[in-house]
Image (tube, helix red, strand yellow):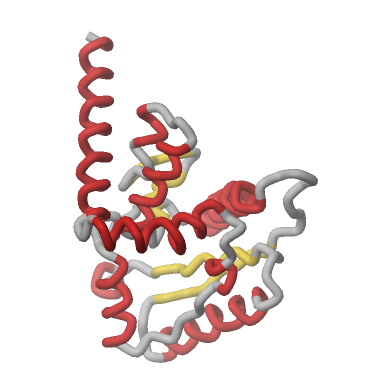
Amino acid sequence: MARPLGIVVTALHVHHGLNPAADRWLAHGRALCARWARRGLAVEFAATKLEDGPGAGESVEAWARQARYRALRQMALDLGIDLVLLAHHRRDQAETFLLQALRGGGVAGLSAMPGRVRREGVTWARPWLDMPRQALEAYVRRHRLAHVEDDSNADARFARNRLRLEVWPEMIHVWHAFGGQLQAGRRAIVAAGEWMDRRFAG
């Protein structure tokens, strides 16, 4: 889709230095993009490695997320990239909504992840927020795309993983449309927040 538009897609990779397999993930991404480029696809690859790490008592999840976004932003600015696409899907959004609710998040927190937002010179977009994970997995299988599974996703010490591994399956078992219902609830909260902004701004 990019080539006819004269657009070059750059895959941005952040090496967090947390997982023993991280070097292999970096090599995988670089090799995959190089193979696509040899086929004539308009794709390049750029990576950065984080030099620091979480401090004593600091959440590894929070540190990794904040450091990753800083690194992505810096790479984008250095390369003259204005738009960064993120791969969050519908279940990611539902998990974020639930975690914010459990932490007592307000309207902003319960709005979860925006589909598109511009911050500090970069537009961040999540085009797959309404797409179920199963659809993405089916696409990967159909096109035989080589991919990497992060084994830390099975570590139940992290809050999001506990939710995903232990709570989510039970909720889906009881309420089959659980993910879609959460998405509808989140949208209602967003709409209410926007109405309040307009109401009190006027």
Which one is in front, 25 or 13? 25
Which quarter of the rendered picture does the N terminus lie within?
bottom left
Furthest-right residue in view?
Answer: 56
75 or 80, nearer to the observer: 75
Residue 103 position, x and y percent, is: 49, 35
Location of residue 133 in the rendering, given as x and y in whole percent from the top left corner? 31, 67
Task: Estimate the x, y position of residue 175 in percent, counting from the top left.
Answer: 23, 56
**What residue appears at the point 54 percent right and 69 percent down from the top-left corner?**
154
- Location of residue 43 with respect to 145 vertically, above or below: above
Residue under the image location 71 percent in, 75 percent down? 20
Q: Quadrant of the C terminus?
A: top left
Figure disc tally: 0
Q: Is residue 78 left or right of residue 175?
A: right
Residue 128 shown left or right of residue 155 in the figure: left
Q: Considering depth in this image, is 149 or 168 the residue closer to the camera?
A: 168
Residue 106 quadrant: top left
